[in-house]
Image (cartoon, grey):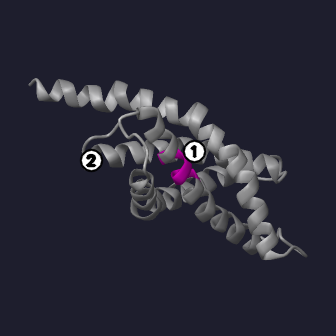
Amino acid sequence: MPTTKKEEIYFGLMMCLGMVVFMTFYNLFTHGMMDTISLKGILIQLIAVYITASLLELFIVGPVAKKIALSLPYDKSKKVLVILFLAFFMVSGMVLCMSLYGLGTAYFSNSLVGESLLESYFSFVFTNFIFAFPLQLLIVGPLVRYVFRKFVKARRMTESFR
């Protein structure tokens, strides 16, 4: 886990990258757009979503989720509980915010014809949360923590011995 502000930024950006890649393809698939969007379109979408998600995670959702998760009364010496609470609040906040992003994208591309904005938003939130939370807990979270320990933390350890 990150121990410095610089490490928190690296960790957050790595986590965002993993979640954005999976969630973008998940949303393209669930909305039947895998065959209709070009590779260039997918890359542009990935970059735009990554920038948006990173800014949200670093400046809004991340600090709020961390504050809420660490203010709750549970045994913080149990690392698994800290990870679960942080993941829950991070995923919840990011799903609420990024579903707004998806709603805006869908609205401006005229793919919500005849649908209520509020109903579409809650549908996006539900379908995104049921995929994002297990994805975070079972795949992206463990993978990012492993890569973070292996490369970021290991590099810091070798630099401190020089």
Q: Helix or strand or loop: what does disc 1 sit on?
A: helix
Q: Residue placed at 72% from the left, 45% from the top? A: 26
The percent position of residue 46, horizontal first and vertical second, equals: 59, 51
Residue range in magenta is 86-91
Q: In the rendered image, which quarter contains the C terminus?
A: top left
Q: Quadrant of residue 14?
A: top left
- Contact? badges 1 and 2 (CB < 8 Å): no
Q: Is residue 121 magenta?
A: no
Label disc, if present, on residue 121 of the rendered structure: none
- Residue at image position (59%, 64%) is 97
Residue 95, relative to residue 105: is it above or below? above
Disc 2 residue type (three-letter)? Lys
Q: Which amino acid does label 1 sit on?
A: Met
Question: Is residue 91 at least partly visible in the picture?
Answer: yes
Q: Label 1 to label 2, Cα distance in Å?
A: 20 Å
What element does badge 2 sit on?
helix
Residue reaching furthest to the right: 114
* Residue 41: x %, y % from top left: 68, 54
Reading the image, the residue beneath label 1 is 19
Residue drawn at (27%, 41%) of the image: 3
Residue beneath disc 2? 6
